[in-house]
Image (spheres, rainbow, N blue to C red):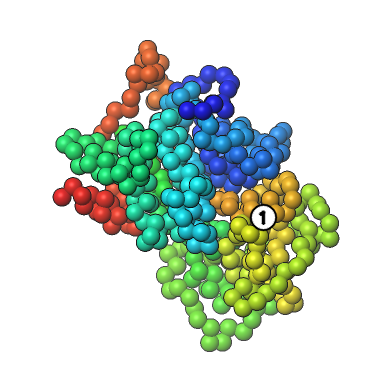
Amino acid sequence: MGTTLVKGPKFSLIELDVDLFGGAGGLALGLRSAGFSPIFVYEKDKQACETLRYNSGPGGTLPVTVFEGDVRDVGWDNLRRRVRLVAAGAPCQPFSLGGKHRAQRDERNLFPEVLRAVRGVEPMAVVIENVRGILRDDFRPFFEYILRQLEFPSLACRREEIWQDHDRRIRRHQCSSGYLPEYQVSWRLLEAADFGIPQLRKRVFIVATRADLPLYKFPLPTHSRGALDREQLDGTYWERHGIKGPSVKGRRTGEARLNGTAAWLTVRDAFFGLPAPSEEGSALNHWLIRGARAYAGHGGSRLDWPSKTIKAGVHGVPGGENSVTLDDGTFRYYTLREAARIQTFPDGHHFTGARIHVTRHLGNAVPCLLAAKVASPLFRLLKPLVQVEADHAAKVSSLSTLRPPLSEPTVRFDVEGQELRESLDGGCR
């Protein structure tokens, strides 16, 4: 299908990782931090590719191989069975609460391309990130359809077949005698602040592992609102920043159960160590942006609380968004570097292009640290298996005949996914 964008040397059986819709590199940075490498990043936005290439150079933050172009034009056959991981922050606008809500009817719905890549390269694992809006009642049937496809991706959608008919075909196959899944699928709605990101940002993560591999388990939260409330009440937070805290008389104590978690990180925490913004451009992408206006329902983020969600803005960033109210009561936009800090990009990661481009890339990015927290247990799960696969491949005369042995199905979802799994099985009864 189309023209392949991948040209280069031959690889061993399992040697590389693939990041679709790379954007400015948030997901790829998290994957690399977790141990995944080398990474092939695919992105069609020209300005995003310039940012990726800038940071992939000598001494850069993200040494990846960048392929500029539409993933719909990529042929995956030459990477078959050489890929450990396919990761995709699929475009979220079709399912965003602030978008047009067209879901599977939206031309930007590229989930079919994610599944085509999975069929094409047969990876050991898949990671998908998207907005929480995909769980809305109107979109839920399509979300469940995505999960069913991931469980058995080789049963592809036929030409001109609508997704509802394809879904029914998958259900019938799953209910057939002797059915064995190809992948085990888990999903979770995660709050970024619960994992050390100084931002309130809820995102859905889907992780699929090949059926003959151990089941992936999502990490537990490491940070909590209750711990931040406690630190602000006992003064620890204010002492750390060298400032006088507000009166706490009559203040609520927040969550009682801390479970050994650290405090949520705040905007003030994110800004720590940054110089004052400059009036002009800087290597840090850290200059003042004029024109911020606050109005009812769109006030700025508070310094001593996690930031509101960093947004891309389809028609620009509306009043009050991506902004902060400072100690002196003044109100301004975040600088691009401050927004990058809140998205946990390293300071050495430079963003190229005009503000409108960088704002869009930052708002669409997966927080680097959140991606790392999700990917780290997956890397630990896969790492000892890569050499086993390579040793086995040496004994096989033809890669085209190699198929993974399938174990007895043990498709289990975590707490949030269990109810969904029961609904998926309902058609078999």
x, y percent for residue 171:
25, 44
- Name which quarter of the figure residue 300 lies in: bottom right
Closer-to-camera residue (139/77): 139
x, y percent for residue 278:
82, 59
User: Which residue is drawn at the image coordinates 35% and 45% (left, top)?
Assistant: 163
Q: In this view, does 245 lie above or below 419?
A: below
Q: In this view, does 348 lie above or below 226?
A: above
Mark 1, Cα crowd under 10 Å, few <14 / some 14-19 / many 20+, is many
Q: Is residue 213 left or right of residue 44?
A: left
Q: Is residue 359 above or below residue 7?
A: below
- Name which quarter of the figure residue 176 lies in: top left
x, y percent for residue 364:
58, 52
User: Which residue is drawn at the image coordinates 42% and 26% (left, top)?
Assistant: 81
User: Which residue is drawn at the image coordinates 32% and 38% (left, top)?
Assistant: 152
Q: Name the outermost residue toward the top.
A: 397
Q: Name the outermost residue toward the front.
A: 160
Task: Report the amino acid beneath label 1.
Answer: Thr
- Name which quarter of the figure residue 53 lies in: top right
Q: In this view, does 426 lie to the left or right of 242?
A: left
Closer-to-camera residue (365/198): 365
Q: In this view, does 210 lie to the left or right of 306?
A: left
x, y percent for residue 30:
56, 45
Closer-to-camera residue (190/358): 358
Disc 1 target residue: 359
Closer-to-camera residue (162/369): 162
User: Which residue is drawn at the image coordinates 32% and 57% (left, top)?
Assistant: 415
Q: Is residue 308 above or below residue 119?
A: below
Give the structural element (helix, strand or loop) at label 1.
helix
